Amino acid sequence: MKSDRGFSEERAQAVDRLVTLGYLRSRDVMRAMKTVPREDFLPVALRRQAYVDTPLTIGYGQTISALHMVAMMADALDLAAGQTILEVGGGSGYHAAVIAEVVAPLSGGHVGHVYSVEIVPELARFAQENLRRAGYAGRVTALLGDGSLGLAESAPYDRIMVAAAAPGIPGPLLDQLVDGGVLVIPVGDLYFFQELVRVRKEGPQLRRESLGGVAFVPLRGEHGWRTGR
Ligand code: SAH
């Protein structure tokens, strides 16, 4: 079993590599990724691979995003302490913990919060347990539900991040975004040819920009792909 110290050295090196490769510019996200123990968000058998920059399977046909994708998306969200965030597709809870480190750091008394919605019951429980063990339960609320509908009861959100690919931008997510807010979402075909899109809401206008090609698992639910469970 690798020691905690071994993991923290690997973690720091992995984050430095992401910076060198140009995936990461925000100092706050760098600090967050050097703090959150990705090994604690993986099934035990995969812990040794925590800092390999690749998607890792978390069961139920789902994956935890590769490190560079977590970095890119967190960077693209333009996060700041105090913000309220919605994550659609909680998976392991890892990405939500990274975002919580930025919007609700333990120092400074910030009241930022992350709401994370997951549609697979077993994964919603997995995320809740991981977040609790890693010390994020007070800063991240992980819920079971169809995140393609957003989460109306805690809206509006300063930032919304979707971790699964959608056929289009779900209307409820735009409705639940504050004016001036940012939404980052992969949009495109099932499994292939998806584009990571950043949308900034400016009054009645939406400013849409492409952040490049990506490959995510499908978004399911009401405004997702109506496949399987
Ligand atoms: N951010 C995650 C990666 C999750 S992968 C992490 O850090 O581990 C994408 C997740 O989206 C999967 O767990 C999948 O079950 C979930 N998902 C797909 N459609 C969804 C929906 N409509 N609402 C909520 N979660 C959804």
Image (cartoon, rainbow, N blue to C red):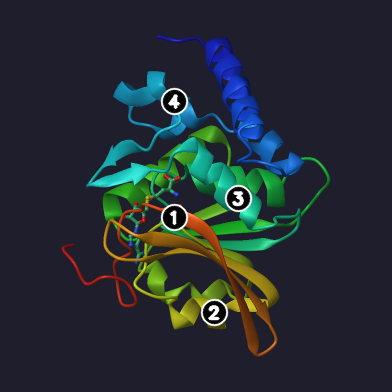
Quadrant containing ligand 1 reads bottom left
Residue 4 quadrant: top right
**Farthest-out residue, bottom:** 204
How far, Cα to Cα, is label 1 from label 3? 16 Å
User: What residue is disc 4 on?
Assistant: 52
Question: Sequence-wise, which precedes: disc 2 or disc 3?
Answer: 3
At x 26%, y 70%, the residue is: 225
What secondary structure is found at the residue carrying circle 1?
Answer: strand
Residue 94 percent coordinates (x, y): 49, 41
Residue 182 appears in the figure: yes
Res 137 seen here: no
Residue count near mark 1 (Cα–Cα under 10 Å), binned few <14, some 14–19, many ≥20 = some
x then y, percent, for residue 110: 78, 53
Q: Which amino acid lies under the numbered mark 1 shown in the image of this protein?
A: Gly
Which one is nearer the viewer's eye here, 22 or 138?
22
From mark 2 to mark 4, how far is it between C-alphas?
34 Å
- Which quadrant would the C terminus be assigned to in this image? bottom left
Read off the residue under disc 3.
74
Instruction: Say which label, 4 or 3, has the lower sequence index.
Output: 4
Marks 2 and 4 close (CB-CB < 8 Å): no
Q: Earlier in the sequence, mark 1 or mark 3?
A: 3
Q: Which-is-in-front pick, marks 2 and 4?
A: 4
Q: CA distance from mark 4 to mark 3?
A: 18 Å
Pick the residue in front: 124 or 138: 124
The residue beneath circle 2 is 174
Q: Residue at x 39, y 22 (%)?
A: 49
Which secondary structure lies at badge 3?
Answer: helix
Left or right, 164 with respect to 137, comes to left
